[in-house]
Amino acid sequence: VTTTGLAGLPTPCLLLDRDRMQSNIDRMTQRAHALDVRLRPHVKTCKSIEIARLMTAPDRAAITVSTLREAEYFAAAGFTDILYAVSIAPQSVARVLALNAGGANVQVLLDAPETAREVAAGAAALGQTLHAWIEIDVDGHRAGLAPDDPLLIDVARVLHAAPEVRLAGVLTHAGGAYDCRSAIALERHAEQERRRCVRASRNLAAAGIPCPEVSVGSTPTALSASSLDGVTELRAGVYVFFDLVQAGLGVCGIEDIALSVLTTVISHNRAQRRLIVDAGALALSKDRGTAEQSRDCGYGLLMGPDGGQPIPGLRVAAVNQEHGIIELPPQSDFADFPIGSHLRVLPNHACMTAAAYDDYHVIDGRGDVLARWSRCNGW
Ligand SMILES: Cc1ncc(COP(=O)(O)O)c(C=O)c1O
């Protein structure tokens, strides 16, 4: 049921601009098509059935998840090809197998021989086929094995020797791309991601271990790669909403950001020329991903309740648990932001901000609320 305007909504709450989101989805879908790879969207950003369906339209094909809770949630909604792209904790293998016994094909990720043995033993105990991916480190950002690390072959041999396990392929996430400061640096990083992950798969093939799939991706590298030669699939997630970090990287404009937090002005601190709003650390997150970028957006930039462009000079400068603190620029007056009036905060990092909410208020370009879509938080 459509509700006119935002006036009656409780704050803080999460607003999702449907049209902006759809054009972000279309952009990445076309990008994967142009690069000739399958798109396996990461649904950790949206954690929503309705949005994941739009991201995988028309066939509800492959998705990536970051928690087993997501795997269960999306499997229950009919998604089957689900890659759980965080190294599996040994005690969680049984939970994956239980889900797969119900008809899903949840695939696991690992980078250690110990984990490979646990996965093999768990699948063997139930006589169930389980697809496993090996994580590759292409930039020292996080987990994974370097393409030339001899341990890569050792891990692959454990998986290859297990009758119930299928080695699906190698996977990497070039998180180091977030430190790039120019378009050319991003393009180079995307090429490094591609080259090193393909190299890992070739090293396995040379050792006699078939490695059918090569999965790469992050939003900035997906939008900056000039070629994905040798890659079979592309993963990205935050593109669905975009955020200020992505705008700072230059892979989207601020006008592409589909997610914002509706907040209310709750106090005027006239002595310090500050506005206080009811969106603080819990409502926005404490992610400071723009701190090292050329434009530091504090804890978020502000728009009027109708959206549009950010209000010049305004940002959430500090947060307490439930308070957001905004310094009033010299050209503004308290009368411009009466107590009880609404503002919208653009998030630094959409995944982290959205994580505080149980649902989205989906709005159209006029700010009318079209629907409420729920999210699955937790583990
Ligand atoms: C394994 C993996 N794949 C894909 C992604 C998606 O990247 P992005 O958030 O840049 O869209 C992430 C994000 O953290 C990830 O951890």
Image: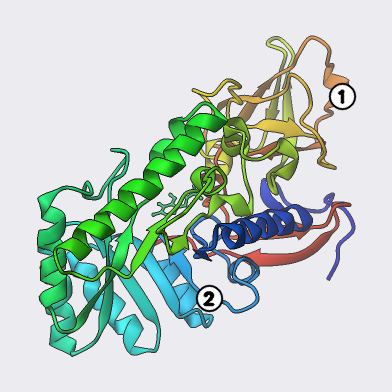
In this rendered view, identify the residue nearer to me: 183 or 366.
183
Mark 1 or mark 2, which is nearer to you?
2
Neighbours of disc 2 within 10 Å: few (<14), some (14-19), many (20+):
some
Q: Residue at 56% x, 64% y: name it.
A: 375
Q: Residue at 61% x, 58% y: name it.
A: 34
Q: Is residue 85 left or right of residue 313?
A: left
- Image position of 259 with respect to 338: above or below: below
Q: Amino acid at mark 1?
A: Asp
Q: Amino acid at mark 2?
A: Ala
Residue 287 seen by the camera: no
Q: Which residue is mark 2?
A: 61
Q: Quadrant of the N terminus?
A: bottom right
- Image position of 241 with respect to 205: above or below: above
Q: Is residue 248 left or right of residue 93?
A: right
Residue 142 seen by the camera: yes
Q: Is residue 274 left or right of residue 182?
A: right
Which label belongs to residue 135? none
Spatial CA distance of label 1 from label 2 is 48 Å
Classify mark 2: helix, strand or loop: loop
Q: Residue at 86% x, 66% y: name it.
A: 2
Q: Quadrant of the C terminus?
A: bottom left
Neighbours of disc 1 within 10 Å: few (<14), some (14-19), many (20+):
few
- Image position of 262 with respect to 230: above or below: above
**x and y, in percent, of residue 179 in the image:** 44, 30
Which label belongs to residue 336? 1
Examine the image and state in which quarter residue 373 appears: bottom right
In this rendered view, identify the residue nearer to me: 277 or 194.
194
